[in-house]
Image: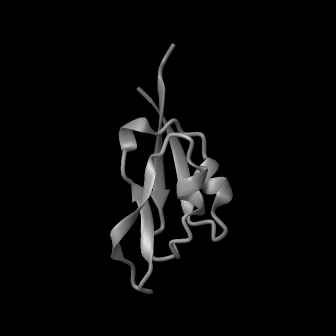
């Protein structure tokens, strides 16, 4: 059986850095960046992409809908 891995894509310019996705992630994949976007907010990014299981908890929690989750077969 193929192993499935996840990938998170964050729309950096729409992210307001609320951290709901960071807290919702069971694998602790996401974190807030040290950089800021065009609006001056720190944005979410995949700090540990190898741990992503593609559960999409982060996308469900995002109030602005700026997260997409993809499942990749290895």
* 59 lies left or right of 16: right
- At x 66%, y 58%, the residue is 61
Toward the viewer: 8 or 47? Answer: 47
Q: Which residue is the extreme one toward the bottom? A: 39
Q: Which residue is the extreme one toward the top? A: 1
63 over 67 or under it: above or below: below
Image coordinates of residue 13 in percent, x first then y, are: 45, 76
* 21 lies left or right of 73: right
- At x 47%, y 22%, the residue is 3
Structure colour scheme? one colour
Q: Which image quarter holds the C terminus?
A: top left
Image coordinates of residue 36 in percent, x first then y, are: 36, 78
- At x 45%, y 53%, the residue is 30
**Number of marks in picture:** 0
Q: Which residue is the extreme one toward the left? A: 35
Image coordinates of residue 2 in percent, x first then y, are: 48, 18
16 over 9 or under it: above or below: below
- At x 44%, y 70%, the residue is 43
Image coordinates of residue 68 in percent, x first then y, are: 55, 55
67 over 5 or under it: above or below: below
Rendered image quadrant of residue 20: bottom right
């Amino acid at each position: 059986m193929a192993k499935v891995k996840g990938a998170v894509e964050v729309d950096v310019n729409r992210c307001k850095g609320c951290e709901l996705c960071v807290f919702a992630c069971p694998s602790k994949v996401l974190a807030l960046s040290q950089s800021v976007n065009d609006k001056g907010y720190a944005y979410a990014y995949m700090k540990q992409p190898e741990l992503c299981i593609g559960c999409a908890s982060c996308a469900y929690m995002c109030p602005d809908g700026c997260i997409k989750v993809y499942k990749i077969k290895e």
